[in-house]
Image (cartoon, grey):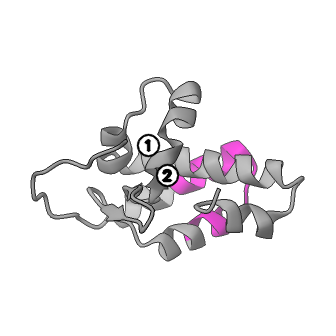
Amino acid sequence: MFTPPADDVKPIPVPDEIYTQCITDAARYFGIDAELVFTLFDNEGGKVGTFSRNTNGTYDIGPMQINSSNLPEIKKHFPTVTWRVLAYDACASFWVGTWWLYRKIVDRKGNVFEGIADYNSK
Protein backbone atom coordinates (compact mmCIF):
# COMPACT_ATOMS: atom_id res chain seq x y z
CA MET A 1 0.00 0.00 0.00
CA PHE A 2 1.29 3.43 -0.92
CA THR A 3 1.79 5.98 1.85
CA PRO A 4 2.57 9.58 0.89
CA PRO A 5 5.45 11.41 2.54
CA ALA A 6 4.83 12.77 6.00
CA ASP A 7 6.49 16.12 5.34
CA ASP A 8 4.32 19.12 4.67
CA VAL A 9 5.69 20.28 1.33
CA LYS A 10 3.23 22.69 -0.19
CA PRO A 11 2.22 21.69 -3.76
CA ILE A 12 3.22 24.20 -6.43
CA PRO A 13 1.63 24.93 -9.82
CA VAL A 14 3.34 23.63 -12.94
CA PRO A 15 4.97 26.46 -14.91
CA ASP A 16 3.14 27.13 -18.20
CA GLU A 17 6.17 26.47 -20.38
CA ILE A 18 6.74 23.07 -18.74
CA TYR A 19 3.23 21.76 -19.16
CA THR A 20 2.86 23.19 -22.65
CA GLN A 21 6.06 21.61 -23.97
CA CYS A 22 5.81 18.30 -22.13
CA ILE A 23 2.15 17.68 -22.94
CA THR A 24 2.66 18.67 -26.57
CA ASP A 25 5.65 16.32 -26.92
CA ALA A 26 3.99 13.40 -25.12
CA ALA A 27 0.72 13.76 -27.04
CA ARG A 28 2.58 13.86 -30.35
CA TYR A 29 4.60 10.77 -29.39
CA PHE A 30 1.52 8.73 -28.44
CA GLY A 31 -0.64 10.08 -31.28
CA ILE A 32 -3.19 11.73 -29.01
CA ASP A 33 -4.73 15.15 -29.56
CA ALA A 34 -2.82 17.42 -27.16
CA GLU A 35 -6.04 19.28 -26.32
CA LEU A 36 -7.35 16.09 -24.70
CA VAL A 37 -4.32 15.92 -22.44
CA PHE A 38 -4.47 19.65 -21.62
CA THR A 39 -8.15 19.23 -20.72
CA LEU A 40 -7.42 16.16 -18.62
CA PHE A 41 -4.65 18.02 -16.77
CA ASP A 42 -6.96 20.99 -16.16
CA ASN A 43 -9.68 18.65 -14.90
CA GLU A 44 -7.36 16.67 -12.64
CA GLY A 45 -6.13 19.88 -11.02
CA GLY A 46 -2.87 18.39 -9.81
CA LYS A 47 0.25 20.31 -8.92
CA VAL A 48 3.85 19.34 -8.33
CA GLY A 49 3.85 17.58 -4.96
CA THR A 50 0.10 16.87 -4.85
CA PHE A 51 -1.16 13.76 -3.06
CA SER A 52 -4.97 13.49 -3.09
CA ARG A 53 -6.44 10.77 -0.89
CA ASN A 54 -9.36 8.84 -2.37
CA THR A 55 -12.18 7.23 -0.40
CA ASN A 56 -10.84 3.76 -1.24
CA GLY A 57 -7.48 4.52 0.43
CA THR A 58 -5.49 5.09 -2.76
CA TYR A 59 -3.84 8.38 -3.67
CA ASP A 60 -3.77 10.44 -6.85
CA ILE A 61 -0.21 11.65 -7.34
CA GLY A 62 1.34 14.71 -8.97
CA PRO A 63 0.18 16.99 -11.77
CA MET A 64 -1.65 14.27 -13.73
CA GLN A 65 -3.09 12.75 -10.53
CA ILE A 66 -1.97 9.22 -11.41
CA ASN A 67 -3.57 6.74 -9.03
CA SER A 68 -1.22 4.92 -6.66
CA SER A 69 -2.92 1.60 -7.47
CA ASN A 70 -1.38 1.90 -10.95
CA LEU A 71 2.22 2.12 -9.69
CA PRO A 72 3.00 -1.61 -10.21
CA GLU A 73 1.80 -1.46 -13.84
CA ILE A 74 3.69 1.77 -14.46
CA LYS A 75 6.85 0.21 -12.99
CA LYS A 76 6.67 -2.60 -15.58
CA HIS A 77 6.81 -0.11 -18.43
CA PHE A 78 8.88 2.64 -16.82
CA PRO A 79 11.25 0.93 -14.34
CA THR A 80 12.85 4.17 -13.15
CA VAL A 81 9.55 5.98 -12.50
CA THR A 82 8.61 5.95 -8.82
CA TRP A 83 5.88 7.78 -6.96
CA ARG A 84 8.45 10.48 -6.17
CA VAL A 85 9.09 11.02 -9.88
CA LEU A 86 5.35 11.23 -10.59
CA ALA A 87 4.85 13.66 -7.72
CA TYR A 88 7.79 15.98 -8.21
CA ASP A 89 8.79 15.78 -11.90
CA ALA A 90 5.98 17.46 -13.82
CA CYS A 91 7.23 16.44 -17.24
CA ALA A 92 7.50 12.78 -16.20
CA SER A 93 3.97 12.99 -14.80
CA PHE A 94 2.70 14.34 -18.12
CA TRP A 95 4.48 11.65 -20.13
CA VAL A 96 3.25 8.80 -17.92
CA GLY A 97 -0.24 10.30 -17.73
CA THR A 98 -0.39 10.63 -21.51
CA TRP A 99 0.82 7.04 -21.89
CA TRP A 100 -1.83 5.90 -19.39
CA LEU A 101 -4.53 7.75 -21.34
CA TYR A 102 -3.22 6.21 -24.58
CA ARG A 103 -3.46 2.73 -23.04
CA LYS A 104 -7.00 3.38 -21.88
CA ILE A 105 -8.04 4.54 -25.35
CA VAL A 106 -6.42 1.45 -26.91
CA ASP A 107 -8.14 -0.78 -24.31
CA ARG A 108 -11.43 0.78 -25.41
CA LYS A 109 -10.66 0.01 -29.06
CA GLY A 110 -10.04 3.65 -29.92
CA ASN A 111 -13.04 5.13 -28.13
CA VAL A 112 -11.54 8.36 -26.81
CA PHE A 113 -14.44 9.23 -24.52
CA GLU A 114 -14.43 5.84 -22.82
CA GLY A 115 -10.63 6.00 -22.52
CA ILE A 116 -10.87 9.37 -20.79
CA ALA A 117 -13.59 8.03 -18.49
CA ASP A 118 -11.31 5.12 -17.58
CA TYR A 119 -8.28 7.33 -16.89
CA ASN A 120 -8.73 7.25 -13.11
CA SER A 121 -11.52 4.75 -12.70
CA LYS A 122 -9.79 1.56 -13.88
Q: Which residue is mark 2?
A: 94
Res 54 quadrant in image: bottom left
Tag 2, which secondary structure?
Answer: helix
Res 8 quadrant in image: bottom left
Res 119 quadrant in image: bottom right
- Of residues 120 and 85, which is closer to you in this image? 120
- The span picked out in magenta is 23-38
- Of residues 100 and 72, which is closer to you in this image? 72
Q: Quadrant of the C terminus?
A: bottom right
Tag 1, which secondary structure?
Answer: helix
- Of residues 109 and 24, which is closer to you in this image? 109
The amino acid marked with disc number 1 is Ala
Q: Residue at x 39, y 57 (%)?
A: 59
Contact (CB < 8 A) between labels 1 and 2? Answer: yes
Q: Which residue is mark 1?
A: 92
* Residue 60 % position (x, y): 41, 58
Picture mark count = 2
Determine whether, in the image, residue 117 is placed left or right of residue 69.
right
* Residue 68 % position (x, y): 44, 48
